[in-house]
Structures are given as C-alpha cells and as structure tokens.
Image (tube, rainbow, N blue to C red):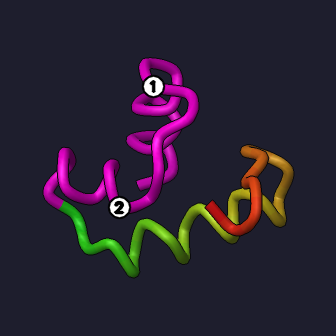
Amino acid sequence: MRDTLLSYLRIIPAASADMMAQELGLSQLEVQETLIQMDDDGEVIMRSGW
C-alpha cells in the first residue's frame, strides 16, 4: 500500500487520508495508519496529523 500512496501523493501532494481512501477504494483508517507509519519512517511529512 505504501507504493500506491506514494504514487498518489506524487500526483496530488497535499491529499488528505480521506481523499486518498475514497479515490483508491481503501479503508480511511488503514490509509491513515499507513501514512502515520510512513511519516515516522520519514517517507512523507504529515501536517497536523493529516
């Protein structure tokens, strides 16, 4: 899922977890948790938890 989210963020850099989940047909919670882990790993930068 990380590769999918990174690909999406290359197209829409300021996308929210909710937006990505809806457009990719994924669970919002699953996307949010993955993004938090990616932020912890330095792959993305989340702002105010988004």
Q: Position of residue 50 (x, y in %)?
A: 62, 60
Locate residue 33: give its quadrant: bottom right
Q: CA gap, disc 1 to disc 2? A: 13 Å
Reading the image, the residue beneath label 2 is 18
Q: Position of residue 13 (x, y in %)?
A: 56, 28
User: Where is 10 relative to 32, above or below?
Assistant: above
Choose between 8 and 46: the one closer to the eye: 46
Direction front: furthest residue: 48
Q: Main secondary structure of the magenta part?
A: helix
Locate residue 11: give its quadrant: top left
Magenta span contains residue 22: yes
Q: Are marks 1 and 2 in contact (CB under 8 Å)?
A: no
Query: What's drawn in magenta, residue-wise?
Result: 1-25
Q: Earlier in the sequence, mark 1 or mark 2?
A: 1
Specify few, some or many for label 1: CA neighbours under 10 Å numbering under 14, 14-19, or 20 or more: few
Horizontal side of residue 14 vs 44, given as left or right: left
Specify few, some or many for label 2: CA neighbours under 10 Å numbering under 14, 14-19, or 20 or more: some
Q: Amino acid at mark 1?
A: Ile
Reading the image, the residue beneath label 1 is 12
| Residue at position x 59%, y 62% in the image | 35
Horizontal side of residue 18 vs 48, given as left or right: left
Magenta span contains residue 50: no
Secondary structure beneath disc 2? helix
| Residue at position x 44%, y 29% in the image | 7
Q: Position of residue 45 (x, y in %)?
A: 78, 47
